[in-house]
Image (spheres, coloured by chain):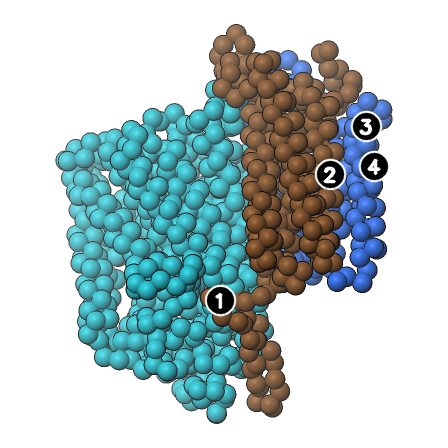
Amino acid sequence: MSHEYVPEIAVDRDGKEHEVQGWQGDFYGGKLGFWLFMLTEVMMFGAMFLVLTYYFSLHPADFLEASSELNVLLGGTNTVVLLISALTMGLGLLKMRNGDIAGAKLMIWATIILALLFLGIKAVEWTNEYQHGVFLGLDALQSGNEHSKPFGQILFFGMYFTMTGLHGFHIIIGIGLMLWLLKRINAGKVSTEHHILHFNIALYWDLVHLIWVFVFPYFYMIGAGDVVGGVINAH
Amino acid sequence: MSKTYFDETHCAIGHPKSTFMQWMLTVDHKRIGLMYAAVIFTFFFVAVAVAFTLRLELFAPGQQFLDPNTYNQVFTLHGVIMVFLFIIPGIPAVFGNIVMPLMIGAKDVSFPRLNWFTFWLYIFGALIALSSLWTGNGFADTGWTFYAPYSLNTDTNVITTLVAAFVLGMASILTGLNFIVTIHRLRAPGMDFFKMPLFVWGIYATAWIQLLATPVVGITLVLAILEKTFGIGIFDPAKGGDPILFEHLFWIYSHPAVYLMILPAFGIMSEIIPAFSRREVFGYRTIALSSAAIAGIGYLVWGHHLFTSGMSDIAKVIFSFLTFLVAIPTGIKFYDWVATMYKGKIILSVPMLWALGTMITFVIGGLTGVTIAMVGPDIHLQDTYYTVAHFHYAMLGGVVFLFFAGLHYWFPLVTGKMYPEGKAKIAFYLNFIGFNVLWFPMFIAGYQGMPRRYFDYLPEFEIYHQVAFFGAVIFISGLVYMFYVLIKAWKNGEPSGTNPWNATTLEWHLPTSPPPLENHTKVPYVDFRPYEYHHGEPVVKFDLKTMKRID
Amino acid sequence: MLTNYKTLKAGYYKVLIGLLVLTTITFVQPYMFMLDSTFGIQMLIGAVKAWIILMYYMHLKGEKLIGWTVIFAVALVVVFFAIVVVDVEHFQYKDASHITSQELDVTHTTSHEK
């Protein structure tokens, strides 16, 4: 597999030469492939949003009530953290394309730290919720006991933990990918001329950000504020 | 020069000396396709054997040797293996891998290492599925559809099976992704989309279904797993969840999945019919675009599985209507194939026999599908043997028969050997007759009310089950005999030469048979349509050393 | 080396500022204005942000083939939404259903008022 690739030439009947695209070193192919992979993520989260919307339409008031219980401050901080990490990731790629390998590595490290910060805040948030008795498997989210929340709220929190959990899982994968990318850069396998891996991981990180752009308002913001959807909140 | 892909290979990691490790690590699309074939057909025979135990149990009313719970697990096992391990990877994994890159003049797929990884992901998923046979409280007894809420409540080992289905789904997604990029990027110069062989069109349409529909069922399975482990409530009516939503999400994938199975099979048909009619395919563009149309409409018809589940009436009407639309592109294909044969020089070789046999069985399967797509009749026929017969006619008599057609068609390409024509024909007739005797009685039994998945039945259905049993015996003998003939031919058959069928597409213009490691000696320039015949002879001829046209 | 490195870098910062402004609107909207349609506004802002990220951070601008594949996938999700919504809206046994009839409080009345 390590042999050097020399593009082949196909000759048509008029003697004209046409360069043959091989699978080796196909930047556009790599990009297309990764976009297609991201479309599968879109379909996955799309299906989850479908579930969420379905139950929102069944239990609008419960959803708003449950949403108002989430911590907008922590969630909002995380939104900004991700926003900045998307910038550092983008700048890292830009530096890589510009030949500034050291700068690129620095930016990747910055992104990793921001990602860890995101996870840390997430952990604080989940711990708080656990202490308030709202967590998967606790009584409040089970049916038929005195702590049971109404259906709509059980479903809201069920989807909240599922979707932010899966999003967090993507963040963890992203950190792993970035560490791997650093290793590949150090090994000289990723360089200014050959940076498809960096390009695709940057795309991945943007996708993770993109999902959060919808996850955040759908869970944290719909029930924030005093008067929502024509229904006065209980508190 | 005469080294073939059996003699040398590229590997994913390093280059081990042992032949065995070279196979395990190979990134060559032909070897990977061949390994898929070996594993997939092994599972096929396992699932056939499992189905045969069901037939044995059903030979007479009452309990023979399976208790009702085991019976549920056995038909689930049959469904899971056949659907997730055999027919969904099926044609794309085997012939998509082996033949598609050859047809477009590529050296390999776009991501050969990913292809290697995908194969092992598939094996990993298969091992998880099998492991659930012996772990936990026994294999799932839900049917392959895992309908909530039963799948959430049963204490059999559903989680492991769900995980397996998820992993296999990921393998399917990655296969599709690889093929889409390959078809977009690696076509030989000059070959635009409307110069591609129709099999490639089938694979392309299928790849889009694999890519975009599979994630939906993937996340549904994840939600079901989370439901079982943490009780998130999404599909559990006790917590306000809606089981119908599970059915929606499940069929959003699983209905397009049947088009995922049939489209490459139609592709094989579109290769065989012109090659053995020695005539350019009739309506090339309509066949190509109808593949895309089936894939597109196929996304929008899932609801016809939910007619009796408690869906709203308006949705039933919409889904029924959309389902009828699928019959149009499918019909176009059939008329095109028949028109191709008209005034052609038809050669009744084995692949052509299988293709023609499929025309009969698939039309039965397809038209009975239209009857149950109507809301009214479906209320009567849903979950009866009529439905069972319908989808076996469509899947087995359509997809698998064409898979076998492809097996005979590309056998000389893959192995370099030719099988004995006479014996292979006997195998076809055994299969064809056995198949019809096995499944046709089920239409009648189902119409009269024999429900699906029942372990016991009323005495008046006995005759249908017994006829089906004898059909099964003939059919299975045919299957075994067919593979026996093929395997024997692989060992001792006559060398076939590079183009035994006088076919026109690029995979028949390789320098050796079986093909060398990196396929064509040189990538040709494609300025011709895929099926050009003149007076029964291929128009386009190549000098196989330089890949220049010499006609 | 990139000839237009400075411009590209400035572009990244401009996009960041745009996104930050939109995010700020996200935060203040539920407390300040259009309180009756918070959900719609929030999703709209989300869509605008997504569009900006896609176009500028993910370099989708000018990508013909990839652009169409993205449109196709998103359209498919929208169609799934539409069909399921039609089904749910027209479900004729809402009142008899265990999962919808349990709540006799606000939910029940609001879902029937529209």
- How crowded pointer 1 is (Cα within 10 Å; few <14, some 14-19, many 20+) is rated as few
**Residue underneath mark 1:** A2
**Closer to the camera in the image, B518 or B271:** B518
**Residue underneath mark 3:** C29
Chain B takes which shade in the image? cyan
Q: Secondary structure at mark 3?
A: helix
1 or 2: mark nearer the eye: 1
Q: Secondary structure at mark 1?
A: loop
**Residue underneath mark 4:** C21
Query: What is the chain letter for disc 2?
Result: A
Residue at position x 32%, y 64% in the image: B17
Distance CA(mark 1)–CA(mark 3): 57 Å
Q: Secondary structure at mark 2?
A: helix
Asked whether, in this view, residue B390 is left or right of residue B293, the answer is left
- Letter of the brown chain: A
2 or 3: mark nearer the eye: 2
The tag on residue A83 is 2
Q: Name the quadrant containing residue B146.
A: top left
Where in the figure is residue C10, as x and y percent of width and height? 83, 50
Q: Name the quadrant containing residue B353.
A: bottom left
Distance CA(mark 2)–CA(mark 3): 19 Å
